[in-house]
Image (cartoon, helix red, strand yellow):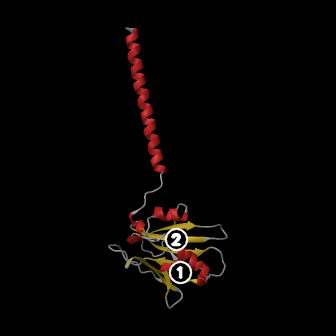
Amino acid sequence: MAREVLGKRSKIMKKTNNAKKTVKKTVKKQKRRKIRPPKAAKTRSIGMNVLLKSLREVEAQFGKKATMASSLLDMVGQGEKAYGFLTGTMDNGWDVTVGLFNGKARYARFKKRRGTKWTEGDLRAVWMQIGPLSNWKKSDDPDYFDYTEKQGDNVVATATGWQTAARSRAFIYVPAVPNEIGIIPDRAAVDQKP
C-alpha cells in the first residue's frame, strides 16, 4: 500500500513538474515575441520617412524613443499629440518635434540646437529626413517649399512647409489627409513656439 501511495505521488509530481516547464516555455516565447521588431504599417508604400508614419516608425527613423513635447498647433482638442526627439549632442544636433493626429505624423519641426547660421545644407538635411531630394522644390519665395511623391503619374503624397533662417528652423506638414482633420498652421504662431 505504501508503494502504491508513493507511486501515485511520484506521478503527480511528474505531472506538476511538466506543467511548470510548459508554463516557463510559454512565458519565454511571449517575452521573445515582445522583442521582435514591429511589422511594417500599411503606410509603408509611401516613401516619406517621418510624415504619415506611426509613432513607432518615427522612433525607428530617429533611432530612439520619443519624449512628450508641447503641441505646436494648439489643436489638442482635435487630437493633436506632439513628441520630441533630440539628435546629436547638447551643443550640436537637432530638436525635432513631430505632431500626430489619429496616430499619423502630420507635421515635423526641425530646430538647430547650435547657434550657427542656417544654411542651404541645413535645409537639405531636413528635407532628406522627410523624403528624397528629387521630390522637393522651392517656390518663388525661397522660404517656402513643397514635397510631391508620385507612383507613376499618380500623386500619392504631398507636404509643404517653410524655413525660418533667422531662428534656425524649418516646419513641414501634410495639410490634408482623406477622412481626417485638415491642418492650417499659422507661421508666426508656430515660429514663436520654443
Closer to the eye: label 2 or 1: 2
**In this image, 87 relative to 48: left or right?**
right
Give whichever of 157, 185 is nearer the camera: 157
Q: Which mark is residue 97?
A: 2
The Cα atoms of the two marked residues, 2 and 1, are separated by: 13 Å
Quadrant occupied by the N terminus: top left
Give above or below for 77 relative to 168: above
Q: In the image, residue 45 lies at what x, y percent?
A: 41, 68
Q: Which mark is residue 191?
A: 1
**In this image, 190 relative to 152: left or right?**
right
Cβ atoms at labels 2 and 1 below 8 Å apart:
no
Residue found farthest to the top:
1
Residue in the image at 57% along x and 78% along y: 124
Q: In the image, residue 153 lies at what x, y percent?
A: 37, 79
Residue in the image at 52% along x and 65% along y: 61
Q: In the image, residue 39 lies at what x, y percent?
A: 43, 57
Quadrant occupied by the C terminus: bottom right
Give whichever of 5, 167 is nearer the camera: 5
Q: In the image, residue 46 lies at what x, y percent?
A: 42, 70
Q: Which mark is residue 103?
A: none
Q: Please name the amino acid that badge 2 sits on.
A: Thr
Q: Please name the amino acid that badge 1 sits on.
A: Asp
Residue 194 visible from this viewpoint: no
Q: Report helix, strand or loop for mark 1.
A: helix
Give above or below for 1 relative to 47: above
- Categorize mark 2 by other alpha carbons within 10 Å: few (<14), some (14-19), many (20+): many
Give whichever of 63, 128 is nearer the camera: 128
Give whichever of 116, 34 is nearer the camera: 34
Residue found farthest to the front:
152
